[in-house]
Image (spheres, rainbow, N blue to C red):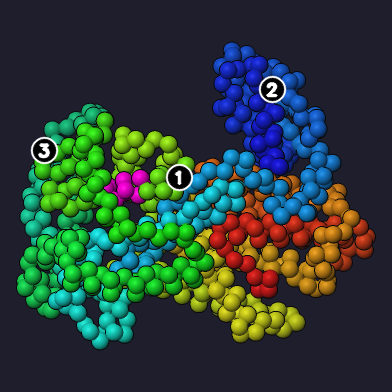
C-alpha cells in the first residue's frame, strides 16, 4: 500500500464538499518532517480558508470532521493556525509491516494500467570513446527504465547512437590522410578518436580564424557603447543602470568567446606539425562534410570504411555498458532511419506542413521565429529529420504510449520544437517528455575536464573509482578486530561494486536539473549520503545473519510477528512502509534522487535502531525474532531500492 496515496484519497473525499478544486489542496498532504507532529501533516486548511474567506482553524476542524481515517490513524489533531496532524495507529503500522514479510514487491502494487514507454538515453557517437558527458544520461536513463518497469509498465530502452553523422565524415577524411596504421592495428577505437579530434581541431582552427576579426569588432563596439552609456547615465536612473549591466554581461560573454577562439588558434599556431597540416588543408571542414555526403549517397569506398569501423566502435561502447551493468532493448542508430528521411520530408511538404525558406525545407512552429529545419540548403538532412523518423517508428512499430528523452538541458529548445512538429504531423497519441539534466563539474565549477582540457574518458573514470574503492575496502578489511575476512578475489569484486556504485549514486543523488561538482572523497565516503553508506548498511545486516547462523528462508516462514514497541522500531517500520511512495514519486517525476533520499533515510533509520537495541543478544526470543525480521525487511528494501537505481550490493564488505 502506498500510504501517502491512501491518506490523500481520504482527504480528497473530505474536501469534495468544500471546494470544486480539490487536487491542489490534496497535494498539500505530506509526510511530516518532524515526528513530534505525527506521521503525516496537511497544510491545506490555511489556503482553503483564504479562498473561502473563513478562519483556517475552523476549516481544519471541518475537514477533520469529514475525514474518515479511523481504520488507519489515531484521531487527527488540529494545531497552530490550522495544521492537521495525523499519526498512524501502532496496530496499523504493525499489520502493514508484517504484510511486507511475504511480499516480494515490498508493499508496492503494480499499475493496473500498464503503458508502453520508450526511454531514449545515453546515445553516444560511436566513433569516439565515451566520456564523462555521457554519464548522466546513461545512469539517469537506466534508473528511470528500472523504476518504470518495476511499476509494471512495458519499458523499451533505446540507445539512439550517433553512427551516421558528420563525425564519420571527419573520421573517414582523417583515415584517408592522417592514419597511423600501427596505432590503428593495435587500438582501432583510440586511433579513430585521434583522427576525429585532429580533423575537428583543424576545422575549429580555421573557423576561429575566420570568426575572430568580426568578433573583435563587436567587442570594440560594445566597449564604446558601454563607455558612452557610463558617461550619460544618471546614478538614479534604474533603467539605464540595468541596461548598462546587461551590456557589460554581453561584453563579458563576447570576450570569453574571443578568448576561447584565440586559444584554439594559438594551440595550432604554436605546434609546427599542426600548423603545417592546417595550412595544407584550409578547407578541411568542407572536405570532411563531402565525405559524409558521399557516405550518405552510398559511395562504395566510404560505405566499406563505415562497415569496417562500426563493429569495433560498438564493441568498445558495449564494454563500458557491461561494466555499468546496463543493457538496452534496442540500439537503433541514425543509420537505421536514414533511408526513411527523404520520404518523410516529401510527405511533410505534400501535407503543407513544411515549406522552403532560404533554400532549406522547414517546419514552421506557431509562436517560434526560427524554423525547424528538416533539410538543409545543400540537401543534407538534420537531427530534426532523424528525430521525426524515430517518432514515426516508435509510434507505428513499437506502439508507444509515451516517449521519454533523457538528454541534457541544452537541448530543451530542440525537443520543444520536435514535440510541436510531431503533433502537427499527426502523432498526438504518445506523451512526449524531455527529462533534462545539468552538467558534471570539476572543482573549478567548470565542466569536468582532464588537465589537457579534454573530456574525461568514462572508462578511465570508472577505473579511478574502482582503484580508490579498493583502497577503502583494503583498509576496512585489514582493520577488522578478528582479522581480514575477504580474499583477493572478493576484495576486487567489492571494490568494483563500491566504485561503480559510488559513481552512479553520486550522479543520481542530485536533482537532475542541477549541475553538480564531482568529489571523490564525498562520493566514496562510508558515512553520509553515499552509495557506500547504504551498501555497508546492507552488508551489516547480512553480517548479523551470518554471525548468528540464521537461516533467512526459515525466518521468513515463522509465525512470529514484527513488534514496534520502541520508538526506533516504529520509526524504522514506518520508513519501510514508505518504499512504495518513494518509487511512485520517483517514477512520476522521473527523479531518481527521490529514491536515493529514501534509501539514505532508511539506512540512517536502521543505524539508529541497531545502535540502540540488541538483536542477536536480545534474551527475549519473540523480540529477538521480531528484530531479525525487521533487519531482514530492511535489507530487502535496501537491496531492491539500489537495484532500481542500477547499483549492486555485496554481502560482505
Q: Which image quadrant: the N terminus?
A: top right
Mark nearer the N terminus (2 vs 1): 2
Give the residue number, with chain letter if any, for mark 2.
Answer: 14
Give the residue number, with chain letter if any, for mark 1.
Answer: 400
Q: Are marks 2 and 1 in contact (CB under 8 Å)?
A: no
Front residue of this view, candidates 568 and 63:
63
> What residue is shown at x 67% (from left), y 81% (from top)?
486
Whether residue 103 sits left or right of residue 580 in the image: it is right
- What secondary structure is marked by label 3? helix
The CA distance from mark 2 to mark 1 is 37 Å
Residue 454 percent coordinates (x, y): 30, 68
Q: Nearer the viewer, mark 2 or mark 1?
A: 1
Q: Nearer the viewer, mark 3 or mark 2?
A: 2
The CA distance from mark 3 to mark 2 is 65 Å
From the viewer's perspective, is residue 198 above or below residue 208?
below
Q: Main secondary structure of the magenta part?
A: helix
Amino acid at each position: 500500500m502506498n500510504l501517502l496515496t491512501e491518506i490523500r484519497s481520504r482527504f480528497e473525499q473530505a474536501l469534495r464538499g468544500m471546494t470544486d478544486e480539490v487536487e491542489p489542496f490534496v497535494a498539500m498532504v505530506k509526510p511530516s518532517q518532524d515526528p513530534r507532529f505525527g506521521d503525516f501533516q496537511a497544510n491545506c486548511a490555511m489556503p482553503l480558508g483564504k479562498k473561502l474567506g473563513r478562519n483556517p482553524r475552523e476549516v481544519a476542524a471541518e475537514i477533520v470532521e469529514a475525514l474518515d481515517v479511523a481504520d488507519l490513524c489515531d484521531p487527527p489533531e488540529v494545531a497552530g493556525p490550522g495544521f492537521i496532524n495525523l499519526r498512524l495507529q501502532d496496530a496499523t503500522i504493525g499489520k502493514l509491516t508484517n504484510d511486507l514479510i511475504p511480499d516480494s514487491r515490498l508493499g508496492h502494487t503494480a499499475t493496473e494500467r500498464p503503458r508502453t514507454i520508450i526511454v531514449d538515453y545515453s546515445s553516444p557517437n560511436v566513433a569516439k570513446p565515451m566520456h564523462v558527458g555521457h554519464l548522466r544520461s546513461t545512469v539517469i536513463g537506466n534508473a528511470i527504465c528500472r523504476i518504470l518497469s518495476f511499476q509494471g509498465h512495458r519499458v523499451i530502452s533505446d540507445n539512439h547512437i550517433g553512427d551516421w553523422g558528420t563525425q564519420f565524415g571527419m573520421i573517414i577524411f582523417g583515415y584517408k590522410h592522417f592514419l597511423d596504421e600501427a596505432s590503428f592495428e593495435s587500438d582501432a577505437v583510440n586511433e579513430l578518436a585521434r583522427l576525429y579530434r585532429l580533423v575537428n581541431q583543424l576545422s575549429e582552427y580555421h573557423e576561429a580564424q575566420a570568426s575572430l576579426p568580426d568578433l573583435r569588432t563587436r567587442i570594440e563596439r560594445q566597449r564604446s557603447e558601454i563607455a558612452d552609456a557610463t558617461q550619460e547615465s544618471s546614478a538614479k536612473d534604474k533603467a539605464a543602470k540595468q541596461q548598462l549591466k546587461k551590456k557589460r554581461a554581453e561584453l563579458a560573454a563576447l570576450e570569453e568567446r574571443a578568448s576561447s577562439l584565440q586559444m584554439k588558434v594559438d594551440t595550432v599556431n604554436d605546434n609546427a606539425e599542426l600548423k603545417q597540416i592546417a595550412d595544407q588543408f584550409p578547407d578541411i571542414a568542407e572536405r570532411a562534410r563531402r565525405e559524409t555526403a558521399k557516405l550518405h549517397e552510398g559511395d562504395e569506398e566510404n560505405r566499406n570504411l563505415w562497415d569496417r569501423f562500426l563493429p569495433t566502435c560498438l564493441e568498445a561502447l558495449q564494454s563500458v555498458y557491461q561494466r555499468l551493468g546496463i543493457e538496452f532493448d534496442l540500439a537503433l542508430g541514425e543509420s537505421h532511419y536514414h533511408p526513411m528521411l527523404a520520404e518523410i520530408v516529401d510527405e511533410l511538404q505534400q501535407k503543407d506542413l513544411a515549406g522552403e525558406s532560404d533554400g532549406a525545407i522547414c517546419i514552421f512552429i506557431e509562436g517560434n521565429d526560427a524554423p525547424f529545419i528538416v533539410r538543409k540548403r545543400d540537401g543534407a538532412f538534420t537531427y530534426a529529420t532523424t528525430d521525426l523518423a524515430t517518432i514515426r517508428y516508435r509510434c507505428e512499430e513499437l506502439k508507444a504510449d509515451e516517449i521519454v528523452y533523457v538528454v541534457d538541458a541544452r537541448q530543451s529548445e530542440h525537443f520543444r520544437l520536435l514535440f510541436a512538429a510531431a503533433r502537427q504531423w499527426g502523432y498526438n497519441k504518445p506523451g512526449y517528455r524531455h527529462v533534462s539534466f545539468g552538467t558534471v563539474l570539476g572543482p573549478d565549477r567548470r565542466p569536468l575536464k582532464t588537465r589537457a582540457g579534454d573530456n574525461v574518458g568514462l572508462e578511465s573514470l570508472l577505473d579511478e573509482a574502482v582503484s580508490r574503492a579498493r583502497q577503502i575496502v583494503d583498509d576496512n578489511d585489514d582493520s577488522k578486530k578478528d582479522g581480514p575476512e575477504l580474499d583477493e578475489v572478493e576484495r576486487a569484486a567489492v571494490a568494483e561494486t563500491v566504485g561503480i556504485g559510488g559513481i552512479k549514486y553520486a550522479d543520481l543523488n542530485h536533482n537532475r536539473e542541477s549541475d553538480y561538482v564531482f568529489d571523490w572523497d564525498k562520493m566514496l565516503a562510508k558515512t553520509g549520503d553515499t552509495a557506500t553508506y547504504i551498501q555497508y548498511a546492507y552488508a551489516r545486516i547480512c553480517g548479523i545473519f551470518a554471525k548468528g547462523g540464521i537461516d533467512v528462508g526459515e525466518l521468513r516462514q515463522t509465525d512470529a510477528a514484527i513488534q514496534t514497541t520502541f520508538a526506533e522500531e516504529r520509526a524504522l517500520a514506518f520508513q519501510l512502509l514508505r518504499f512504495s511512495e518513494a518509487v511512485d514519486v520517483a517514477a512520476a517525476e522521473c527523479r531518481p534522487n527521490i529514491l536515493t533520499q529514501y534509501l539514505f533515510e532508511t539506512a540512517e533509520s536502521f543505524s539508529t535502531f541497531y545502535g540502540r537495541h540488541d538483536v542477536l543478544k536480545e534474551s527475549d526470543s519473540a523480540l529477538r525474532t521480531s528484530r531479525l525480521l525487521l533487519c531482514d525487511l530492511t535489507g530487502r528494501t535496501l537491496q531492491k531500492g539500489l537495484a532500481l537505481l542500477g547499483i549492486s550490493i555485496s554481502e560482505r564488505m
